[in-house]
Amino acid sequence: MSARSAELQRKTAETQVELSLALDGAGEAQIETGVGFFDHMLTHIARHGLFDLTVAASGDVHVDFHHLVEDVGIVLGSAIADAIGDKVGLVRYGMAACPMDEALVLVSLDLSGRPWCRCDLDLPTEKIGDFDTELVREFFTALANNAAMALHLEQRAGVNSHHIVESGFKSFARALDQATRLDDRVTGVPSTKGTL
């Protein structure tokens, strides 16, 4: 793949994930996980972050969606880490809050090399369609750990689970777009340590 992009595969006894990511894209998405709501959310990451993202994933969804969702998070996080490379000239930080009707989730992130995830969402239902809402936290935790980013999702408003989660994914996309941009004013990496 070219600079600022990555193409990865992960195959386990439970799932198979093939994913490609281009940070400097046009928001094109080709997502097929077999989990409709999850496909919808991943498409938001591409569209609102202006990333080109393809995901082909399958797995033991007859058990539940946990393994599939977590493993896509692992692979997407790894792809983000690969695509940003040595972090020279990187903006590093991003923050966004995209409303979805009554819902508002603020996302702040730091491509620091130190993984952390705080997913502070109060989702009033256990499911959105057939998607378990607890998997939102699993996805973002796996992504943050494998991208080595500090990631905070903070719900400011919302009573509808779909709207809250969608606000979170859109805000994540916009925050990641900010953080992965290059700034020609930055010499080296954006850290007083000289390394990230």
Image (tube, rainbow, N blue to C red):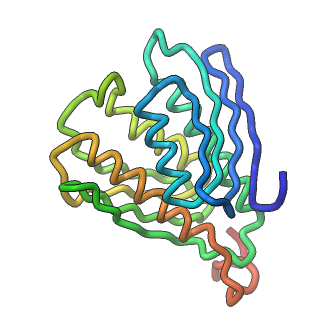
Q: Nearer the viewer, residue 192 or 75?
A: 75
Q: Quadrant of residue 184?
A: bottom right
The residue lying furthest to the bottom in this view is: 185
Q: How many marks?
A: 0
- x, y (%) of residue 37? 40, 33
In the drawing, does residue 152 fall left or right of residue 133?
Answer: right
Q: Position of residue 146 (x, y in %)?
A: 61, 46
Q: Is residue 58 left or right of residue 155?
A: right
Q: Quadrant location of residue 122?
A: top left
Q: Residue at x 56, y 57 (%)?
A: 149
In the rendered image, which quarter is residue 134 located in? top left
Q: Looking at the image, which residue sits at the far top?
A: 62
Lateral position of residue 84 relative to residue 109, left or right = right
Q: Is residue 16 above or below residue 101?
A: above
Q: Does 166 appear above or below 113?
A: above
User: Where, quadrant-wise, is the C terminus in this rendering?
Assistant: bottom right
Measured as percent of width and height from the top left, residue 4 is found at: 75, 61
> Which residue is depicted at the point 55% across and 27% down?
33
Residue at (52%, 54%) from the top-left corner? 47
User: What residue is rendered at 53% in x and 40% in y?
Assistant: 142
